[in-house]
Amino acid sequence: MLGRRLPSALACALLWTIPAAAHDAPQRHVMNAFVRIEEHRAHLVIRVPLDILATVRFPLRGREIDQAAAAPAIQLTLDALAHDVALWEAGRQLVPSSAKGRLSLPSDRSFERYDAAAAHVEASLEPGIAIYSEQGHFDALFTYPIESAGSRFSIRTVVAADLRDYVKLVVRYLPAVGTSSAFLISAADGRVALNPAWYQAAGDFVMLGVQHILTGIDHLLFLLCLVIPLLSLRQVVSVVTAFTVAHSFTLLGSAYGVGPEGVWFPPFVETAIAASIVYMALENILGTDLRRRWLITGLFGLIHGFGFSYGLKENLQFAGRHLVVSLLAFNIGIELGQLAVLAVLLPVLLLLAPLRASRARGSRLAVGHRGPHRLAWMIERGEALRKVRWPKMDLLTLATLTRWVAAAVLAAALIRWLGRRAAAIWSSRGAERGGA
């Protein structure tokens, strides 16, 4: 039996040498903007740090910008921003009917509210104020004619597009009717709906879920180690269902802000995910009771759900008023991605099944050779976890811990019930076939 399991763990060992993809990208520059919708007009007021505007050269007098000669450069900047930051109404790109721009000091705080920002752009720069090259802001106000305030609006930025996620745009959307919302976008996000319909949000989040699972090396590796030793479709369905239910539970909870907080928790989750892969691979080698694998899978699925939530966190802003629909759609996307992987993986494993016994010795040597690489990933993440400050065990922390322990017990009970239910269905179908 050990010889059979060694080749199945070999694939897990080989893939451990692939580095994990980072969830977060560094942020160096931030632009601020408001989009305000009125009955027949839309307004975009935006502030851009001067060091981002590399394509426009303002005239200098020493180290200061020569404001008396800056009018042509201001017009060029307005033209560039009108092109690089675009608004759409129902799929039609809007063309500004008016545009105003000015230079501002880096200490100016006008962009905390829309009214103050718009009034600031309308006002002229006071004479005698020195603005140094690449140290101030360029502020602009664009006005667009629109057909209806109830239309669907979207925005896109390609300012410094070559830097992609290094340059962010904070957009605060102020509709004519309804609540405002805020977005943090970059050129990598493409066109973003400011007030999406539910089906638009659902479609975007389904694709996001598929993309997340197909590019998440750690989750794919766990799925691979999970199904390699399974011998029947019944076992595959059982463990994949357990994984789905468990990660859906913590994904939804974390998205609603009821998950543990603190700088310690993300490194803990990353370390636990790496440990889950190590455990599954060792279990494949040493042997396990496959009838109980669904329970272990469910427990690890709770941890992976938090990992999925980190990939979702920055994108929840695009859900608009359709948070529940977007969460469910994201989860559907993850399941579609898993099904696509299994559709490719299971036939390959079926073809390789006859080779397991004959290649046991060679696989044992290969797994032993890759052992240090298997553990390096988990150790690296554990080092990051060791450096963070753990929370104090006060009443609030104990209450949060108790809540999540109770939730884990509830999820485990649900997974167990589903497992028994699935086993009963498979048994009844088998009995029916036998009777026939």
Image: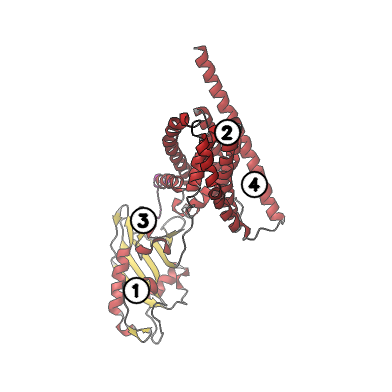
- What colour scheme was applied to this rendering of the protein? secondary structure
Please tell me the numbered disc located at residue 2. Answer: 2
Q: Secondary structure at mark 3?
A: loop
Mark identifier at residue 101: 1
At x 33%, y 72%, the residue is 100
Residue type, label 3:
Gly
Report the residue marked by disc 3: 190
Q: Earlier in the sequence, mark 1 or mark 3?
A: 1
Q: Secondary structure at mark 4?
A: helix
Please state the extent of the stretch shown in magenta in the rendering: 189-202
Q: Are marks 1 and 3 in contact (CB under 8 Å)?
A: no
Q: Any mark on residue 404, and which?
A: 4
What residue is shown at x 59% (from left), y 42% (from top)?
279
Q: Residues within 10 Å of mark 3 (few under 14, many from 20)?
A: few
Other residues around mark 4 within 10 Å, as few (<14) / some (14–19) / many (≥20):
some
Q: Spatial distance from mark 3 to mark 2, Cα to Cα?
A: 51 Å
Q: Residue 321, image x and y in percent?
A: 46, 50
Q: CA distance from mark 4 to mark 2?
A: 37 Å
